[in-house]
């Protein structure tokens, strides 16, 4: 490896990024390699990512026994468990209200399956995105009222549903909330578990609701054991829920650090050994024959489960994870795949139209688009793609009758949750919330112009203090990227938000061969050659008709950043490089 100096190149790349490469201290490197038995490559990546001691126990062979926190460090956990134990011992039916996305489907499935294991009856409601909307709604409360269910758990929603919780109370329904969304307008449920509560000191704010649900059943199971509940029945093996936890954690895009890394790592082990029946059937239908990785959850399995809540039957994702009948699961999996394919088509059409409509006049540094032709289930995906292309926040909205449902995606340095909170306070939107980088909101159609005027008049809120920076993990020659080195990187898995695949810099290369591939020939396959004459096969996705593709095809010399993997074809393994960005020399 060639890692002599630290450099920050002040020239922007082809894609408008700045590159940052930090030097490593030989002393720190040797200490880390010795103390944790790490290779030179892995140790360098860890140092450059500035991981602390708390991260190491989750990085190097973590175990559930040694690394899983006590659930009761979460505020209200103990009190909530005590309430639920009484309900279980009293043989009450528990209502489960889950959000329609992957985190909602997985967290609801975890509790449903656990309750089924211990003989506790539960009733599930997954809202329809259009008919019911996000969160605890009057429709959902009325559903449980008709079933005469007076106690329910809201999952991945409810933190800010002040009015709906009050409506439930008026009708004699008590609600427990298990959620991880930002606290903006806190309701008053019977109890709430949310690591983002002001008084919570658990340091578990990176958990999604699936992870919180898993900790919840650990604490609940422990208390039931104390009550001798399992004297007359078999105690469930909680590890068998970890595959569902992994799906929710990866697909909800929470950082794959610390506890999340542990949960996903153990969940992937289960998926590859003896997966949930529904996940196994979906995996087969998607022809995922190799060892399942976090990227497979993010790009194949997760989107299918999510498609149900976006444009299809919102219950299907939950049903895939809870049904035990093979014939029914085959049908459910087919429907999910079909919904996902429809979603892709709708998304492509909306994205292409959105690009036509964009008008960044008057130096506006945000995107604001709405249409009556866009399905509310895909506006978030379109917003994400626009942010990737233009590197400014994007508001994308679907108009149905006189109602508007919107999604907003942001960039580093601009906290969109604070902007949404201010918009609610000013009465510009009826409801909204989310995280620093993403959120959703609702408003009336006649307020659209007011909202756009407010954003234009307060353009400074979108002033970004941070540059778009790519942090380089390794600098290598093509010859360094051999099978053994690539396989050694697996120690850093699972990859995802907060723990991306290592960014590798190869300097002074050019393409000696290139060819457009894929549907509509939008990808570019090429062979890169460095100054030493060493070659590696490479792919640049969605680059064939963009500037990055033009540079590659013209065979100019450049520095390139990307990821490396092993391509296996007819039992032959070869290194392969995925191009992400480049700088002309």
Image (cartoon, rainbow, N blue to C red):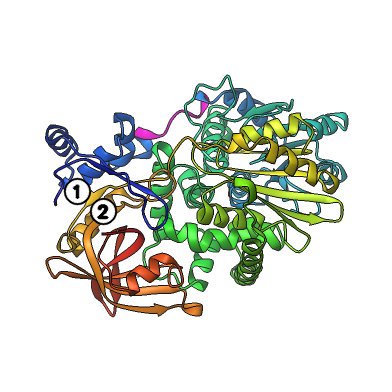
Q: Residues within 10 Å of mark 1 (few under 14, many from 20)?
A: some
Q: Is residue 516 left or right of residue 458?
A: left
Q: In x, y percent, where is residue 310?
A: 67, 58
Tally of numbered discs: 2
Residue 152 visible to the viewer: yes
Quick check: 518 above or below 171? below
Q: Residue at x 33, y 34 (%)?
A: 55
> Quarter-wise, where is residue 160 in the image?
top right
| Mark 2 touches mark 1? (CB < 8 Å) | yes
Q: In x, y percent, where is residue 79?
A: 62, 23
Helix, strand or loop under label 1:
helix
Was residue 67 drawn as part of the magenta stretch in this picture? yes
Q: Is residue 402 left or right of residue 478?
A: right
Q: In x, y percent, where is residue 496?
A: 42, 50
Mark 2 → mark 1, Cα distance in angstroms: 8 Å
* Disc on res. 41: 1
Was residue 293 drawn as part of the magenta stretch in this picture? no
Quick check: 579 above or below 209? below
In the image, farthest residue toward the front = 362
Quick check: 391 above or below 328? above
Q: Point out the stretch of residues depicted in magenta.
A: 66-72
Residue 179 visible to the viewer: no
Query: First in sequence: mark 2 or mark 1?
Result: 1
Q: Residues within 10 Å of mark 2 (few under 14, many from 20)?
A: some
Seen from the viewer's position, the closer of residues 466 and 423 is: 466
Give the residue at mark 2: 489
Q: Residue at x 52, y 73 (%)?
A: 285
């Amino acid at each position: 490896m060639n890692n002599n100096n630290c450099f920050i190149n002040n020239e922007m790349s082809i894609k408008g990024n700045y590159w940052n490469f930090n030097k490593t201290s030989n002393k720190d490197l040797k200490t880390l390699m010795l103390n944790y038995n790490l290779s030179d490559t892995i140790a360098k990546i860890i140092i450059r990512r500035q991981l602390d001691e708390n991260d190491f126990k989750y990085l190097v062979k973590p175990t559930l026994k040694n690394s899983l926190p006590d659930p009761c460090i979460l505020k209200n956990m103990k009190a909530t468990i005590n309430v639920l134990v009484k309900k279980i011992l009293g043989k009450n039916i528990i209502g489960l209200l889950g959000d329609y996305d992957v985190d909602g489907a997985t967290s609801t499935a975890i509790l449903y399956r656990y309750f089924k294991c211990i003989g506790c009856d539960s009733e599930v409601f997954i809202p329809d995105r259009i008919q019911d909307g996000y969160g605890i709604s009057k429709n959902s409360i009325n559903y449980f009222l008709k079933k005469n269910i007076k106690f329910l758990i809201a999952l991945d929603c409810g933190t800010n549903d002040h009015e709906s919780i009050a409506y439930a109370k008026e009708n004699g329904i008590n609600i427990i909330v298990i959620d991880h969304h930002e606290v903006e307008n806190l309701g008053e449920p019977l109890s709430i578990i949310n690591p983002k509560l002001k008084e919570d000191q658990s340091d578990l704010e990176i958990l999604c609701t699936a992870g919180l649900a898993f900790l919840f059943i650990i604490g609940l199971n422990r208390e039931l054991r104390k009550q001798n509940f399992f004297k007359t029945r078999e105690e469930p093996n909680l590890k068998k829920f970890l595959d569902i936890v992994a799906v929710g954690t990866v697909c909800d895009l929470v950082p794959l650090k610390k506890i999340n890394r542990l949960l996903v790592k153990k969940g992937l082990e289960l998926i590859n050994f003896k997966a949930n029946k529904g996940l196994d059937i979906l995996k087969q239908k998607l022809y995922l024959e190799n060892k399942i990785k976090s990227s497979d959850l993010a790009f194949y399995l997760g989107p299918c489960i999510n498609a149900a809540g976006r444009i299809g039957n919102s219950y299907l994702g939950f049903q895939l994870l809870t049904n035990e009948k093979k014939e029914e699961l085959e049908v459910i999996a087919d429907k999910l795949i079909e919904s996902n394919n429809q979603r892709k088509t709708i998304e492509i059409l909306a994205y292409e139209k959105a690009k036509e409509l964009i008008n960044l006049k008057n130096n506006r540094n945000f995107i604001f688009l709405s249409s009556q032709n866009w399905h509310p289930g895909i506006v978030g995906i379109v917003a994400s793609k626009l942010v990737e292309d233009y590197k400014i926040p994007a508001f994308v909205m679907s108009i149905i009758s006189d109602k508007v449902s919107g999604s907003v995606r942001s960039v580093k340095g601009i906290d969109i949750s604070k902007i949404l909170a201010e918009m609610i306070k000013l009465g510009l939107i009826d409801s909204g919330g989310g995280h620093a980088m993403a959120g959703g909101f609702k408003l009336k159609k006649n307020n659209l112009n007011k909202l756009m005027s407010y954003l234009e008049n307060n353009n400074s809120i979108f002033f970004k203090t941070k540059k778009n920076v790519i942090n380089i993990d390794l600098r290598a020659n093509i010859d360094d990227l051999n099978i053994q080195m690539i396989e050694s990187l697996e120690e850093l898995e699972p990859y995802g938000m907060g723990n991306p695949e290592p960014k590798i810099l190869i300097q002074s290369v050019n393409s000696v061969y290139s060819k457009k591939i894929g549907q509509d020939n939008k990808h570019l396959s090429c062979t890169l050659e460095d100054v030493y004459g060493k070659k590696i096969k490479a792919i640049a996705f969605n680059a064939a008709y963009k500037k990055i593709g033009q540079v590659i095809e013209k065979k100019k010399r450049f520095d390139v950043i990307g990821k490396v993997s092993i391509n296996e074809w007819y039992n032959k393994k070869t290194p392969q490089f995925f191009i992400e960005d480049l700088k002309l020399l």
